[in-house]
Image: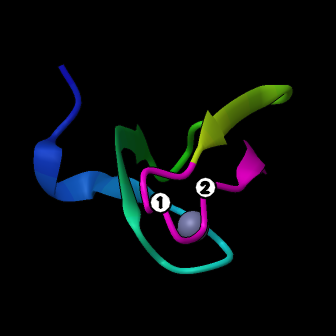
Amino acid sequence: MADIREMKKVVCPYCGTPVNTFYVKDAKCKGVFFKCKNKKCAKQFELKI
Ligand SMILES: [Zn+2]
């Protein structure tokens, strides 16, 4: 189990709304997409770490 204090929350790069996803600072990913929960924004973005 990773230490929760080491985890970062994924936020929308357009409006800053947090998504219910966390990642550790040494995580690596590619091709993972999220959709912003903010109805005024609702943009889809790729998680790049
Ligand atoms: Zn957004």
Residue 26 in which image quadrant: top right
Distance from Cα at disc 1 to Cα at disc 2: 5 Å
Residue found 48% across the figure and 53% down from its top: 25
Q: Position of residue 10 (x, y in %)?
A: 46, 54
Is 48 above or below relative to 2? below
Residue 9 in which image quadrant: bottom left
Q: Position of residue 39 (x, y in %)?
A: 47, 60
Q: Position of residue 47 (x, y in %)?
A: 71, 45
Residue found 14% across the figure and 57% down from its top: 5
Can you identify the residue that label 2 sits on?
Answer: 42
Which residues lie in the magenta part?
36-49
Can you identify the residue that label 1 sits on?
Answer: 39
- Would you say the beta carbon of the disc 2 residue lies within 8 angstroms of ligand 1? yes
Left or right for 20, reference 47 = left
Q: Find out whether the residues at labels 1 and 2 contact each other: C-beta distance under 8 Å.
A: yes
- Would you say the beta carbon of the disc 1 residue lies within 8 angstroms of ligand 1? no
Tag shown at residue 10: none
Task: Name the amino acid type tagged 1.
Answer: Lys
Q: Nearer the viewer, residue 32 or 27?
A: 32
Is 44 above or below relative to 15? above
Q: Quadrant of the N terminus?
A: top left
Report the magenta stretch's main SS: loop
Whether 34 is among the magenta residues is no
Residue found 71% across the figure and 56% down from its top: 43
Whether 41 is among the magenta residues is yes
Helix, strand or loop status at disc 2 = loop
Left or right for 32, reference 26 = right
Q: Position of residue 8 (x, y in %)?
A: 36, 57
Is 1 above or below relative to 30? above
Judged from the image, the quadrant occupied by ligand 1 is bottom right
- Count neighbours of disc 2 (C-alpha within 10 A) and say few if under 14, some if 14 to 19, many if 20 or more: some
